Each structure stands twice: as structure tokens, then as C-alpha cells.
Image (cartoon, helix red, strand yellow):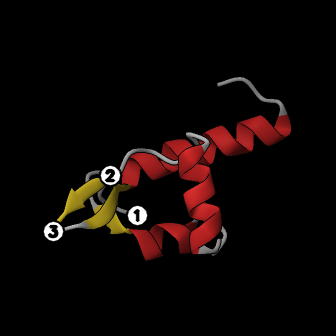
Amino acid sequence: MANPHQLVNQTEARRLNGDVSAMTWWRWRQAGLVPEPVVIRGRNYYRADDLAKMQRALVNQRTGAIG
């Protein structure tokens, strides 16, 4: 993702995070693992930099790294 301020639709966000199902994404949102979306005309979009932070946090959580 070249532009950190780029908005990514929910389908693309799910694909970028392991091609998880819509239900898994919903569960992650309920658990607070997914950043708050930007809602435009009733559709969810995510900031690319927020998704990158989410991915780093998940990797750090799995590996036990701090940061």
C-alpha cells in the first residue's frame, strides 16, 4: 500500500488479512482487533495505515515481540 491515507474497502481489507471470511472479520471487530472503519454511504472503509498497525500488532502478539 503506497499511500498510508488510502482507504481500502472491507472486502480488500479482509483479503489483505489472510482472506478471512466476513464472519471472522465481524468477530475480530467485536473483539476490538480491527480498527474502526470510515463509513461512507453505509459502506465500511479502512485506512491503510490502520490496517498495517493491526497487522503488526497481530504478528507481535503471535511472536511475543514488544512494540
Check whether the beta carbons of the residues at disc 3 and disc 1 lie within 8 A of each other. no
Does the residue at mark 1 contact the one at mark 2 (Cβ under 8 Å)? yes
Q: Nearer the viewer, mark 3 or mark 1?
A: 3
Q: Which residue is mark 2?
A: 4
Q: Which residue is mark 1?
A: 1
Marks 3/1: CA distance?
24 Å
- Tag 1: amino acid: Met
Q: Which residue is denoted by mark 3 in the rendering?
A: 41
Q: Residue at x 26, y 52 (%)?
A: 5
Task: Give the quarter of the image for residue 61.
Answer: top right
Q: CA distance from mark 3 to mark 2?
A: 22 Å
Return the x and y of residue 33 as percentages of the image width and height. 58, 43
Query: Horizontally, is 44 left or right of 39 in the view?
Result: right
Point 73% across, 36% down: residue: 60
Q: Secondary structure at mark 3?
A: loop
Amino acid tagged 3: Arg
